[in-house]
Image: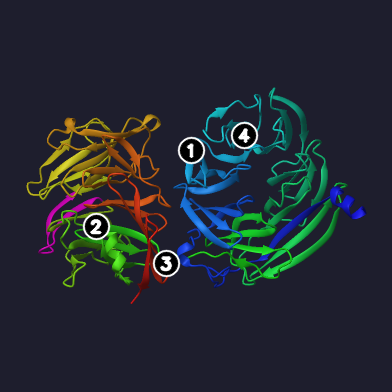
């Protein structure tokens, strides 16, 4: 009986101190022998935050790459991964009892967003953008509202968990809030301000019912005991305070900066401390376990050392009795308290595709390690294929295709790079045939690194970082036309004798400029817009443009079908309330699509707007062919979509040593990925 009573009167504190950490070579899928076709990749950068779904036995990870990863604890492997933001994920909290998470996103400069996702359905519930940094998010105990704190505002704001609607919150809140939580009944809320003030609020009246003062500027605060006790770290070490009186309960002055995280949701004090991370050659981490009684004494201090760990990141959680740690290289490691060796959860390592283009019957792509391949543009032709060969890209990183080459013809491509002025572009003709020819365009004057390249028939259009424009004959390799533009935003062939330039126009009358490369005549494109941001020429010669209208506070971005003879008659296809100067435009057959607004590709037609079926990531590029829209995703995959409906038809992934093509009918074709 004594031992049982001891469990109710004591609270345990685990201190997780990193003494030395180093990188080392390890297997990407050391947990289980799992078919790579069923595995997902990890993150492409550091894992920033993690949480555990006890109902589904999943670890959820979010990273600096904007992806949400799902890891199955039972199989010890990554089972899914999809992009939820174009920005880094700074914080993540799971909605109690739901397959939903709230995310805090930021580019680290001036973009601050909160989004909510149903990760089971891969569906965005809402996205809200704020003008000032968001410092804290947390769901109420029952998940009925989301609490949000911002650096430049006092108090917390309540937000509906599924609609993003701003709800009533207690008035007269003061101070910047570092932490907030509700009681189980959601009738009261506790807030901790950076000043050290702790306040309990009665939510049905909005009245403050208890105030106390604790040490200020506690980092990594953790609440426990049904909001009775608060723990955090300050300049004097780890501290536990009575959240009602602010009185210090316990302190360990040996603890430096680090991160606290809960072990369980019980009323007992159980949490861990992730110590300050340091680079070293030792490669060991130490877990220190504390037992804290409600009388304020520390007992049962012990220490266990784990070795052979890679460099870990700030992402950490507890899953099914084990500790899960994120790594800076995008993986997740786990260990149990009594184990002597941690293990890596299984994941596949992808060969990342970074650039792609279409011309004729060929799809050419390049990988991040500067290799290239040319495959059929029709994914069904890959069903009978064995090997995909990656050849040396000879220092090039980008591809441009000649869109005038239609179906049934060999492809024409330009391989080029933006890094230096030493590597000249390569013209490839007869792509995908035995008579392929590669020609180095060594007569191009490369005074500055290239910024944009286009190909149309026997002409190539080059723009460098200084705004110098050159039209080159691909037959002779000599220059046909040169021109200098002031800060061009985009440029394209209009036809064989004209180019069109997008730029900023403070007079708000001429966002584009048409230049004749034969006569050198310049004609402004008169249209009431401030910025000509994007240009796209389709295979049939149709010209599309993206313009921004109004000031930055009330900007509207529009996609136009340009009428170069009568600019005022240009067709307005879609509007976006906001400024977007980086969206992509493409046409497949009679279908037009774009990524305006940043939430993925959308078809624009007389039937309205139809979003593409979601692939795992946001697009790096959107390309139109005669039969398909092809999306190059930020996860490095290539996907084919129906041009009439946007539905996903097939997806190609490149692993380290093999390629895998999965169709909408769940047919999987695979083969070796060869690197000569």
Local SS, label 3: loop
Q: Distance between the residues labelled 1 and 2?
A: 34 Å
Membership of 475 in magenta stretch: yes
Which residue is the extreme one toward the left?
519
Q: Distance between the residues labelled 3 and 2?
A: 22 Å
Q: Is residue 327 visible?
A: yes
Callout 4 crowding tier (Cα within 10 Å): few <14, some 14–19, many ≥20: some
Q: Is residue 360 above or below residue 84?
A: below
Q: Earlier in the sequence, mark 3 or mark 4?
A: 4
| Quadrant in the rendering for residue 210 | top right
Q: How far apart are marks 2 and 4 (CA)?
A: 49 Å
The residue that label 3 is drawn on is: 655
The residue that label 2 is drawn on is: 358
Which residue is the extreme one toward the bottom?
676
> Over which residues does the magenta segment extend?
467-484
The residue that label 1 is drawn on is: 127
Membership of 111 in magenta stretch: no
Q: How far apart are marks 3 and 4 (CA)?
A: 42 Å
Residue 144 - label = 4
As drawn, is 11 to the left or to the right of 647? right
Q: Earlier in the sequence, mark 2 or mark 4?
A: 4
Q: Earlier in the sequence, mark 1 or mark 2?
A: 1
Percent position (x, y) of residue 305? 72, 68
Q: How far apart are marks 1 and 4 (CA)?
A: 17 Å
Q: Earlier in the sequence, mark 1 or mark 3?
A: 1
């Amino acid at each position: 009986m004594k031992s049982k009573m001891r469990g109710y009167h004591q609270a345990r504190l685990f201190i997780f101190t990193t003494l030395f950490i180093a990188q080392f070579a390890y297997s990407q899928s050391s947990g289980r022998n799992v078919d790579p076709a069923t595995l997902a990749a990890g993150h492409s950068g550091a894992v920033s935050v993690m949480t555990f779904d006890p109902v589904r036995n999943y670890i959820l990870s979010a990273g600096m790459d904007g992806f949400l990863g799902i890891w199955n604890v039972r199989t010890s492997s990554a089972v899914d991964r999809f992009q939820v933001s174009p920005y880094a994920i700074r914080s993540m909290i799971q909605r109690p009892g739901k397959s939903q998470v709230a995310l805090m996103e930021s580019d680290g400069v001036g973009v601050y967003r909160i989004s909510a996702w149903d990760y089971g359905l891969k569906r965005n519930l809402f996205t809200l953008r704020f003008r000032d940094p968001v410092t804290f998010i947390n769901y109420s105990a029952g998940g009925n509202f989301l609490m949000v704190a911002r650096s430049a505002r006092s108090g917390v704001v309540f937000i509906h968990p599924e609609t993003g609607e701003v709800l009533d919150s207690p008035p007269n809140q003061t101070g910047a809030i570092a932490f907030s939580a509700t009681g189980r009944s959601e009738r009261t809320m506790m807030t901790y301000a950076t000043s050290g003030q702790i306040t309990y609020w009665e939510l049905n009246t909005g009245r403050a019912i208890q105030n106390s003062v604790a040490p200020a500027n506690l980092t990594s605060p953790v609440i426990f005991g049904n909001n009775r006790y608060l723990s955090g770290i300050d300049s004097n070490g780890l501290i536990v305070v009575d959240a009602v009186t602010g009185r210090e309960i316990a302190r360990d002055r040996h603890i430096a900066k680090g991160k606290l995280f809960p072990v369980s949701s019980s009323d007992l004090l159980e949490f861990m401390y992730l110590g300050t991370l340091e680079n070293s050659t030792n490669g060991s981490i130490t877990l220190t376990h504390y037992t804290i009684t409600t009388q304020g004494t520390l007992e049962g201090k012990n220490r266990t050392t784990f070795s052979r760990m890679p460099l870990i990141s700030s992402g950490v959680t507890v899953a099914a009795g084990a500790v899960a740690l994120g790594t800076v290289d995008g993986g997740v490691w786990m260990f149990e308290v009594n184990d002597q060796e941690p293990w890596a959860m299984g994941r596949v390592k992808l060969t990342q595709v970074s650039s792609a283009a279409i011309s004729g019957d060929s799809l050419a792509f390049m990988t991040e390690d500067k290799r290239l391949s040319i495959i059929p543009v029709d994914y069904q032709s890959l069903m009978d294929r064995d090997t995909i060969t990656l050849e040396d890209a000879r220092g090039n990183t980008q591809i441009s295709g000649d869109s005038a080459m239609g179906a049934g013809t060999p492809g024409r491509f330009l391989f080029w790079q933006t890094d230096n002025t030493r590597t000249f572009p390569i013209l490839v003709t007869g792509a995908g045939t035995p008579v392929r020819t590669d020609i180095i365009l060594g007569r191009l004057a490369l005074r500055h690194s290239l910024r944009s390249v286009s190909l149309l028939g026997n002409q190539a259009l080059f723009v460098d970082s200084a705004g110098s424009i050159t039209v080159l004959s691909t037959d002779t390799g000599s220059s046909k036309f040169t021109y200098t533009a002031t800060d061009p935003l985009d440029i394209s062939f209009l036809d064989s004798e004209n180019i069109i330039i997008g730029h900023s126009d403070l007079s708000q009358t001429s966002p584009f400029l048409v230049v004749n490369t034969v006569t050198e005549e310049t004609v402004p494109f008169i249209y009431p817009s401030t910025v000509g941001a994007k240009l796209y020429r389709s295979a049939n010669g149709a010209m599309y443009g993206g313009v921004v209208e109004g000031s930055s506070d009330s900007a509207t971005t529009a996609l136009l079908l340009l009428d170069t003879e009568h600019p005022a008659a240009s067709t307005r296809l879609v509007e976006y309330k906001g400024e977007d100067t980086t969206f992509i435009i493409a046409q497949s057959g009679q279908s037009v699509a774009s990524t305006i607004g940043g939430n993925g590709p959308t078809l624009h037609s007389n039937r309205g707007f139809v979003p593409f079926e979601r692939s795992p990531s946001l697009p790096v590029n959107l390309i139109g062919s005669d039969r398909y829209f092809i999306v190059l995703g930020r996860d490095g995959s290539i996907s084919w979509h129906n041009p009439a409906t946007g539905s996903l038809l097939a997806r190609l992934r490149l692993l380290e040593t093999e390629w895998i093509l999965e169709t909408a009918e769940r047919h999987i074709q695979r083969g070796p990925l060869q690197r000569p």
